[in-house]
Image (tube, rainbow, N blue to C red):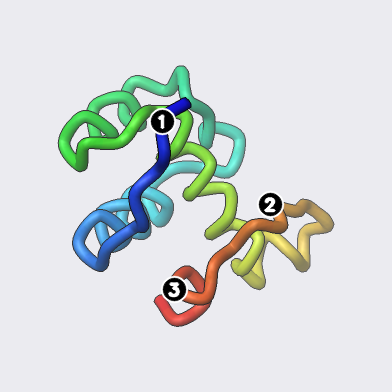
Amino acid sequence: MAVSQPWTRDPLLVAFTLYSQLPFGKLHSRNPEIIRFAALINRTPSALAMKLVNLASLDPFIIESGRTGLRGASKTDREL
């Protein structure tokens, strides 16, 4: 089983930028944009999609709409 590496600042900024451009319903590992950006930051599409949904869990607009993201947002996600 592969051990994941911690998310560093630059890949997190890529993830946050992508999150700000995609609608909530497009945050999945089969999305071509997620696939493309995952390759650029050396992550799997699933890992990037999960990070995006973790970011969604911190987004007041998503929360106020009654939707939720994942509950795995890290301290670094919160600081970003």
Q: Residue 30: x and y, percent?
A: 46, 18
Q: Secondary structure at mark 2?
A: loop
Say whether residue 75 is left or right of residue 44. right
Depth check, mark 1 against mark 2: the one in front is 1
Tell me if residue 38 comes above or below residue 63 in the rendering. above
Seen from the viewer's position, the closer of residues 66 and 78 is: 78
Amino acid type, mark 3: Thr
Query: In the displayed structure, would residue 45 be above or below residue 8?
Result: above
Cβ atoms under marks 2 and 3 closer than 8 Å: no
Residue type (three-letter) at the residue carrying disc 2: Gly
Name the residue beneath numbered marker 2: 69
Q: Please tell me how crowded label 1 is: few (under 14), some (14-19), or many (20+) other residues with Cα within 10 Å.
A: few
From the image, tell me which residue sits under label 3. Answer: 76
Give the alpha-carbon distance from disc 2 to disc 3, as whole Å.
Answer: 16 Å
Pointer 1 or 3: first along the chain: 1
- Tell me which corner region of the image, top left, top right, bottom left or bottom right, holds residue 71: bottom right
Spatial CA distance of label 1 from label 2 is 24 Å
Q: Badge 2, how many Cα within 10 Å: few under 14, some, many 20+?
A: some
Say the numbered circle drawn on residue 2. 1
Q: Report how many numbered discs are placed on residues in the image.
A: 3
The residue lying toward the viewer, choosing from 4 and 54, is: 4
Quick check: 12 left or right of 20? Answer: left
Residue at image point 30% right, 36% down? 43
